[in-house]
């Protein structure tokens, strides 16, 4: 990846983070921590990796994305707005009555959402079904799903993992946001799913471990996933929950809390300063 491309992606990821803070602040609720941790991955998927068209969000040959950890919808909405699916200003309607941007993604309201998600553990099963359907149709689209590391404590995730490997779904990529925090504490304190890479490998997946904030590593992993034939790929992305906002980083209390006015100003000023430095 050349330096200019990486810079452009970093600028978009910073704007995505700003929209995450804007949306959750305006809603007075939401999940900023795990949304901020996936900004780089979501940016790369929507701006470099996936075959998508905001002007034709249901085109048959599009790649599909399933946000299995649906509570981090602020990140999905933010990147979709930057990509042109809807105006960025609409982010301010997050979780409002009548808004298309509900607390979890819904196919009923927003074009470009492939699966209504939010019940943890189910999204990867939906992704498996879509990937299998593509195989049966002889289609060449790819399917990407984002899971939380706390989410993979759900048994249904491993049923889906077993099924995907059994059906050789090499058109499926599961990305685990391994920020090591969930609603009640660290993974070890709640119900540890570690070691994560070894578990996916044991279920028959191609496994790649990366720094989830490095565009170069994200790109390399997704290229490896495309090259892998005969098995699905799991990308275990080590990330920082709350990334980009100093007081939210690695702080479990920001899993599902919105910033107040003072905290909003601090966060936005930090992100604006980071953006100015990138663009300068």
Image (spheres, rainbow, N blue to C red):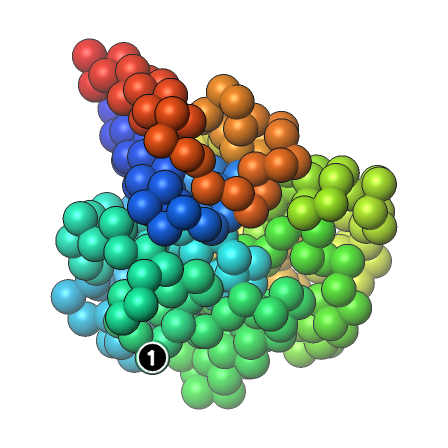
* Name of the residue lying farthest toward the front: 261
Q: Is residue 213 left or right of residue 190?
A: left
Q: Quadrant of the N terminus?
A: top left
Residue at image location 44% in from the left, 35% down from the top: 259
The reply to whether residue 101 is visible in this rendering is no
Residue at image location 56% in from the left, 37% down from the top: 254
Residue at image location 36% in from the left, 76% down from the top: 107
Q: Quadrant of the C terminus?
A: top left
Please name whichever residue, 238 or 271, is drawn nearer the observer in this view of the structure: 271
What percent of the width, then of the height, locates residue 108? 34, 79
- Name the image quarter holding residue 262: top left
What percent of the width, then of the height, locates residue 18? 32, 35
* Name of the residue lying farthest toward the bottom: 137
- Name the image quarter holding residue 57: bottom left
- When the figure is inspected, residue 134 is found, relative to residue 197, above or below; the finding is below
Q: Is residue 162 left or right of residue 62?
A: right
Q: Which residue is mark 1?
A: 108
- Name the image quarter holding residue 276: top left
Q: How would you rate the neighbour count of disc 1 (Cα within 10 Å): few for under 14, some for 14-19, many for 20 or more? A: few
Please name whichever residue, 131 or 21, is drawn nearer the observer in this view of the structure: 21
Q: Is residue 271 left or right of residue 238?
A: left
Residue at image location 58% in from the left, 52% down from the top: 175
The reply to whether residue 138 is visible in this rendering is yes
What percent of the width, then of the height, locates residue 181? 69, 40
- Badge 1 element: loop
What percent of the width, then of the height, locates residue 264? 37, 30
Task: Tell how many labels.
Answer: 1
């Amino acid at each position: 990846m050349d330096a200019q491309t990486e810079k452009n992606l970093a600028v978009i990821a910073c704007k995505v983070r700003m929209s995450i803070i804007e949306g959750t602040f305006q809603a007075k609720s939401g999940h900023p921590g795990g949304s901020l941790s996936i900004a780089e991955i979501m940016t790369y998927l929507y701006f470099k990796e996936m075959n998508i068209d905001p002007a034709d969000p249901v085109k048959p040959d599009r790649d599909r994305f399933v946000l299995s950890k649906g509570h981090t919808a602020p990140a999905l909405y933010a990147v979709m707005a930057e990509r042109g699916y809807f105006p960025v200003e609409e982010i301010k309607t997050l979780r409002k009555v009548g808004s298309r941007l509900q607390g979890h993604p819904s196919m009923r309201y927003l074009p470009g959402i492939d699966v209504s998600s939010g019940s943890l553990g189910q999204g990867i099963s939906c992704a498996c079904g879509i990937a299998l359907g593509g195989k049966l149709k002889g289609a060449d689209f790819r399917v990407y799903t984002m899971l939380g590391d706390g989410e993979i404590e759900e048994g249904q995730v491993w049923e889906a993992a077993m099924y995907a490997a059994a059906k050789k779904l090499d058109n499926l990529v599961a990305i685990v946001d391994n920020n090591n925090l969930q609603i009640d504490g660290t993974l070890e304190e709640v119900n540890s799913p570690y070691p994560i890479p070894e578990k996916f490998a044991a279920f028959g997946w191609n496994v790649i471990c990366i720094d989830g904030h490095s565009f170069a590593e994200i790109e390399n992993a997704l290229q490896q996933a495309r090259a892998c034939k005969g098995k699905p790929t799991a990308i275990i992305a080590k990330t920082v929950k709350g990334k980009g906002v100093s007081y939210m980083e690695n702080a479990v209390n920001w899993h599902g809390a919105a910033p107040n006015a003072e905290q909003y100003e601090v966060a936005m000023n930090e992100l604006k300063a980071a953006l100015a430095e990138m663009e300068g």
